[in-house]
Image: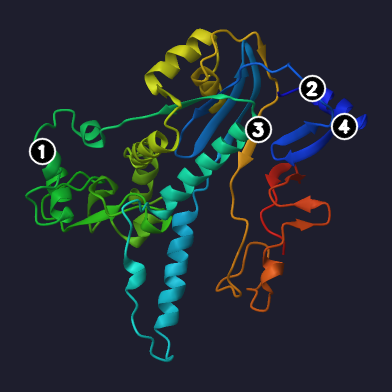
């Protein structure tokens, strides 16, 4: 059973317990104990970027916190693709093409989604293994992305899509914007082109929702600079809604059903009502408290844990570009030196303060 930090310190000081794990901090008693076990519930608030976790027992909130998932997988894969492409174009020996590694299984997921699903399940299993016979409560979401974009869609329109009948996405964007530049709002005697709202180098895509119609007079390098008409329009524009999180939630919902068939499923509409009835603010861990099924909160834990997933290993023996903190790229480093997790009293992701700013340790140089 979870206990207070003071109780844990006294048990460790008197030699009545030992440390089992530090993340999260867990101790095990060294003497026989019977009873003192209450029913516990584990609430998990699923999310594309953050996962809320809360452990409740009767009317008490024992543990609560947030797990921050990784969002750098796509950029790392893009960087690897560029390095490999440049390497293959060099004047080296011929290597026969291999196609066996191009096959995908039925359960294949994109790496960016798969790592989030695996990390979510890892931490859920972690807390399930630390609690005595807990009841698992998970919030899932079911979203109809096409209906969110077009509320009147029905029937065969689901198979056609918004760009159905157009030669390509570019012509669809022109027709959607009525062949009018979205910056100067002029259409006569203008040469039009499409522009990426979120650049592909920043994670954008070629989808129609990320494209707008602009004319060549506005879409110039000078107007892109600070103070230009295009720069002002980009800073003042309304953000186009993105639906990446909805896709992830639809994927993880099916995975949850197969991974935890005995879990109690809760939907977002129920969570909001429960959280407001408990008088809790809108946070990931407060949502998890409401998901856990607690009826009244009489004893709420004051401490909140934050777990951040980040890259722990770098397998390459060379660097094409210098890492942050280095003046030049490192081309002679050994593999075990690149994967250093500690340096003196510091460890990766430790919280530090320097020059009035608070941050975390990301690299050791």
Q: Which residue is mark 1?
A: 157
Q: Nearer the viewer, mark 4 or mark 1?
A: 4
Task: State the CA–CA distance, disc 2 to disc 1.
Answer: 64 Å
Q: Which residue is mark 2?
A: 33
Task: State the CA–CA distance, disc 4 to disc 2.
Answer: 16 Å
Looking at the image, is 304 positioned above or below residue 311?
A: above
Q: Nearer the viewer, residue 339 or 32?
A: 32
Q: Please say whether residue 199 is visible from this viewpoint.
A: yes
At x 36%, y 50%, the residue is: 198
Task: State the CA–CA distance, disc 1 to disc 3.
Answer: 49 Å
| Mark 1 / mark 3, whichever is N-terminal | 3
Q: Nearer the viewer, mark 2 or mark 1?
A: 2
Dot label at residue 12: 4
Q: Nearer the viewer, mark 4 or mark 2?
A: 2
Task: State the CA–CA distance, disc 2 to disc 3.
Answer: 17 Å
Q: Which residue is mark 3?
A: 130
| Mark 3 / mark 4, whichever is N-terminal | 4
Q: Secondary structure at mark 2?
A: loop
| Mark 2 / mark 1, whichever is N-terminal | 2
**Horizontal placement of 66 versus 253: left or right?**
right
Looking at the image, is 262 positioned above or below residue 184?
A: above
| Mark 2 / mark 3, whichever is N-terminal | 2
At x 57%, y 71%, the residue is: 321
| Mark 4 / mark 1, whichever is N-terminal | 4
At x 53%, y 44%, the residue is: 119
**Horizontal placement of 213 versus 299: left or right?**
left
């Amino acid at each position: 059973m979870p206990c207070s930090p003071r109780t844990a310190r006294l048990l460790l000081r008197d030699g009545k317990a030992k440390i089992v794990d530090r993340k999260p901090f867990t101790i095990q008693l060294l003497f026989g104990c019977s009873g003192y076990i209450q029913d516990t519930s584990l609430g998990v608030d699923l999310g594309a970027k953050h996962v809320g976790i809360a452990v409740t027992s009767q009317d008490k909130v024992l543990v609560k916190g947030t797990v921050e998932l990784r969002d750098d997988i796509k950029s790392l894969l893009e960087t690897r693709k560029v390095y490999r492409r440049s390497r293959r174009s060099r004047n080296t020996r011929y290597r026969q093409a291999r196609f066996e590694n191009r096959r995908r299984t039925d359960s294949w997921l994109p790496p960016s989604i798969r790592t989030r699903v695996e990390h979510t399940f890892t931490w859920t299993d972690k807390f399930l293994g630390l609690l005595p016979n807990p009841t698992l409560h998970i919030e899932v979401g079911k979203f109809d992305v096409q209906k969110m974009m077009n509320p009147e869609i029905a029937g065969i329109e689901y198979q056609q899509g918004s760009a159905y009948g157009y030669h390509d996405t570019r012509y669809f964007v022109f027709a959607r914007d009525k062949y009018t530049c979205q910056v100067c709002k002029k259409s006569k005697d203008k040469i039009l082109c499409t522009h990426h709202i979120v650049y592909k180098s920043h994670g954008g895509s070629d989808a129609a929702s990320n494209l707008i119609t602009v004319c060549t007079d506005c879409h110039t390098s000078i107007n892109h600079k600070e103070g230009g008409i295009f720069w002002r329009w980009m800073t003042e524009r309304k953000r186009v809604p993105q639906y990446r999180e909805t896709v992830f939630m639809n994927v993880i919902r099916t995975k949850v059903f197969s991974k935890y068939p005995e879990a109690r499923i809760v939907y977002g509409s129920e969570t909001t009502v429960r959280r407001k009835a408990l008088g809790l603010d809108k946070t990931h861990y407060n949502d998890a408290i409401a998901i856990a099924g607690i009826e009244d909160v009489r004893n709420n834990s004051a401490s909140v844990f934050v777990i951040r997933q980040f890259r722990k290993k770098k397998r390459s023996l060379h660097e094409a570009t210098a890492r942050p903190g280095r003046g030049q790229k490192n081309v002679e480093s050994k593999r075990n030196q690149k994967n250093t997790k500690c340096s003196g009293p510091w460890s990766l992701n430790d919280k530090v303060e320097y020059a009035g700013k608070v941050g975390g340790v990301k690299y050791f140089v």
